[in-house]
Image: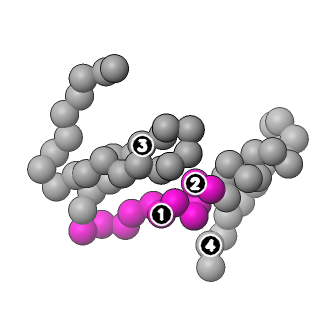
Amino acid sequence: MNAFSIDPDEQIDDLFLKNYKIIQKQGCFRYGTDAVVLSDFAEKYIKKGSRLLDVGT
């Protein structure tokens, strides 16, 4: 496991997918798990080298 430190205004969030975690600042825009789950789903259906845009809701 790699050793690293985070700032006091950051936290590590578990994405519950492939043991991925993300460091995010508190009080700022934060990614939600829906974007991560969508990207994992889309990965199975798009061709390698293709581009994909998630415009949100």
**In the rendering, which numbered label is found on residue 56?**
4
Q: Is residue 53 left or right of residue 20?
A: right
Q: Give the magenta part as a residue range.
A: 27-37
Alpha-carbon neighbours of circle 2 within 10 Å: few (<14), some, or many (≥20)? some
User: Depth check: 49 or 44 in front?
Assistant: 44
Alpha-carbon neighbours of circle 1 within 10 Å: few (<14), some, or many (≥20)? few
Alpha-carbon neighbours of circle 4 within 10 Å: few (<14), some, or many (≥20)? few
Q: Is residue 18 left or right of residue 26?
A: right
* Distance (Cα) linking label 4 and label 2: 12 Å
Way the structure is coloured: one colour
- Residue 32 within the segment the image draws in magenta: yes
* Distance (Cα) linking label 3 and label 2: 11 Å
Q: Residue furthest left?
A: 8
Q: Which residue is mark 3?
A: 21
Residue under the point 19% across and 34% down:
5
CB within 8 Å, label 2 to label 1: yes
- Image height of 13 relative to 33, above or below: above
Tag 1: amino acid: Gly
First in sequence: mark 1 vs mark 3 = 3
Q: Which residue is mark 1?
A: 32
First in sequence: mark 4 vs mark 2 = 2
Residue 37 lies in quadrant: bottom right
SS for callout 2 = helix
Q: Which residue is mark 2?
A: 36
Residue 53 lies in quadrant: bottom right
How many marks can you see? Answer: 4
Residue 12: x, y in percent?
30, 47
Residue 26: x, y in percent?
24, 62
* Distance (Cα) linking label 2 and label 1: 7 Å
SS for callout 4 = loop
Foreground mark, 3 or 4, reads 3
